Image: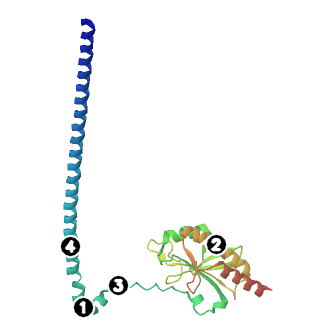
């Protein structure tokens, strides 16, 4: 073995040793870094756990305080006079009285077809609202203060106010108001009850749309299609 070859062998061994030392150092660095990360993460977890435990203790204390306050509050109703409490209990106001004009007060139910147009909560209709609806439906104010609908010279149906005095004489006044409209047909004086009833139904539909109200029977039950069908059948029998 000559000197040159031996020198290259030593150089190769030195390179391998240096590379081994570098790789070993790199491996140790990685291990130390991973260990450091694990330690930090564990500390954070432990810290969060401690904070959660502290928070849980604080919440437990707060709940206990609230429970104690509720127990103290629950003692108060026992000391209240029950009779005095009953006097303070609010009662719903009674429904306002619906006014019937003299034309309808003494009439038998079978002699009159009558429907009430009003709000379900008995909210008043203002004069402005009433005038608009009357104009839309083409109703006219008669001499007695009632509204009426005519075709030619034939009176088909009339409308009274559900509020006293039962007419619309002051409908153009600023302070006018009414619970609603009472549309009715007097079967004893009607020339053509069937024609008048169909006209009244059409105008009721227009009034309902203009006033956003509901239609009730004199019994204060809502009017249904079956009720209308029954009236139509009865009128057909009368004319037959």
Contact (CB < 8 A) between labels 4 and 1? no
Badge 4 density bin: few <14, some 14–19, many ≥20, Cα 10 Å:
few
Give how far apart the Cα atoms at labels 4 and 1 are: 30 Å
Which element carries disc 1, helix, strand or loop? loop
Residue on which disc 4 sits: 64
* In this picture, residue 197 sits left or right of residue 2: right
- Frontmost of labels 1 and 2 is 1
Q: Which residue is mark 1?
A: 81
Q: Position of residue 226 (x, y in %)?
A: 67, 80
CB atoms of marks 4 and 3 within 8 Å: no
Residue at 23% in and 59% down: 52
Residue farthest along the front direction in this orientation: 1
Task: Name the front one of labels 4 and 3.
Answer: 4
Q: Quadrant of the N terminus?
A: top left
- The residue wearing badge 2 is 203
Q: Quadrant of the C terminus?
A: bottom right
> Disc 1 vs disc 3: which is toward the camera?
1
- In the image, residue 17 sits, relative to residue 54, either above or below, namely above
Instruction: Report x, y in % for residue 62.
Output: 20, 68
* Residue 90 - label: 3
Image point 24% across, 14% down: which residue? 10
Please state if 27 lies on the left or on the right of 220 as rendered: left
Which of the numbered marks, if any, corresponds to residue 32? none
Q: How far is mark 1 from mark 3, CA to CA?
A: 17 Å
Q: Earlier in the sequence, mark 2 or mark 3?
A: 3
Looking at the image, the residue that sits furthest to the right is 240
Tell me the SS state at disc 3: loop
Q: Secondary structure at mark 4?
A: helix
**Cα separation between marks 2 and 3:** 40 Å
State which tag comes first along the sequence, 4 or 1.
4
**Quarter occupied by residue 92:** bottom left
């Amino acid at each position: 073995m000559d000197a040159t070859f031996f020198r290259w062998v030593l150089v190769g061994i030195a390179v391998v040793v240096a590379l081994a030392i570098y790789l070993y150092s790199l491996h140790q660095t990685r291990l130390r870094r991973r260990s450091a990360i694990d330690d930090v993460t564990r500390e954070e977890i432990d810290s969060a756990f401690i904070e959660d435990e502290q928070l849980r203790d604080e919440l437990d204390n707060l709940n206990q305080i609230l429970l104690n306050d509720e127990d103290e509050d629950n003692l108060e109703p026992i000391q209240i006079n029950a009779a005095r409490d009953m006097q303070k209990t609010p009662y719903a106001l009674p429904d306002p009285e619906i006014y019937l004009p003299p034309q309808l007060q003494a009439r038998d139910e079978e002699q009159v077809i009558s429907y009430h147009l009003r709000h379900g909560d008995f909210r008043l209709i203002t004069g402005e609202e009433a005038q608009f609806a009357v104009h839309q439906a083409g109703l006219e104010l008669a001499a007695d203060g009632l509204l009426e609908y005519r075709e030619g010279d034939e009176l088909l149906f009339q409308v009274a106010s559900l509020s006293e005095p039962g007419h619309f004489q002051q409908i153009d006044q600023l302070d006018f108001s009414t619970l609603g409209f009472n549309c009715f047909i007097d079967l004893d004086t009607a020339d053509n009850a069937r024609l008048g009833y169909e006209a009244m139904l059409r105008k009721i539909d227009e009034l309902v749309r203009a006033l956003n109200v509901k239609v009730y029977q004199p019994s204060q039950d809502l009017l249904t299609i079956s009720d209308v069908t029954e009236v139509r059948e009865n009128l057909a029998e009368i004319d037959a």
